Amino acid sequence: MRPTQIRQGGGGKIPYPKHVWSPAGGWYSQPANWKTNTAIMGAAIVGICLMIGSVSAEREHRNKMPDPNRFFPSRWWSKQIVEHEKAQKASESS
């Protein structure tokens, strides 16, 4: 080996027991389709979260409406707040 060459890395793979099973795939696991599986599960999780958020927005009820000029994220999706603000604009314009 020349002095300009540098050895890197920790060596080869170590021997491991072949009978061990783990949900993550065990030692040195790199399934061929891990990217596709990850994308599918990510899409499923996003879809479930959107459905839960939709149900939550439908069932949301407010006893006190937010101040008109204050930032309030749920005013974008809460049916009750949207209808309240439309009624306020209609009464102001009349």
Image (cartoon, rainbow, N blue to C red):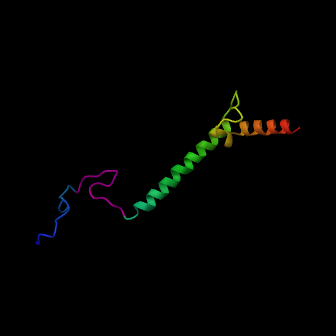
Q: Is residue 77 visible?
A: no
Q: Position of residue 53 (x, y in %)?
A: 60, 42
In the rendered structure, which segment of residues is drawn in magenta? 18-31
User: In the rendered view, does 70 fall on the left or right side of 6?
Assistant: right
Q: Position of residue 62 (x, y in %)?
A: 68, 30
Where's the C terminus, which quadrant? top right
The residue at the far top in this view is 63
| Secondary structure mainly formed by the magenta segment | loop
Where's the N terminus, which quadrant? bottom left
Q: Position of residue 18 (x, y in %)?
A: 23, 57
User: In the rendered view, does 50 fall on the left or right side of 33?
Assistant: right
- Residue at horizontal 49%, vertical 57%? 40
Quadrant assignment, res 58: top right
Quadrant assignment, res 87: top right
Task: Relative to 33, say whether 24 is above or below.
Answer: above
User: In the rendered view, does 24 fall on the left or right side of 79?
Assistant: left
The residue at the far right in this view is 94
- Residue at horizontal 29%, vertical 54%? 26
**21 within the magenta span:** yes
Q: Is residue 5 visible?
A: yes
- Residue at horizontal 25%, vertical 52%? 20
Q: Position of residue 24 (x, y in %)?
A: 34, 52
Q: How many marks?
A: 0
Quadrant assignment, res 17: bottom left
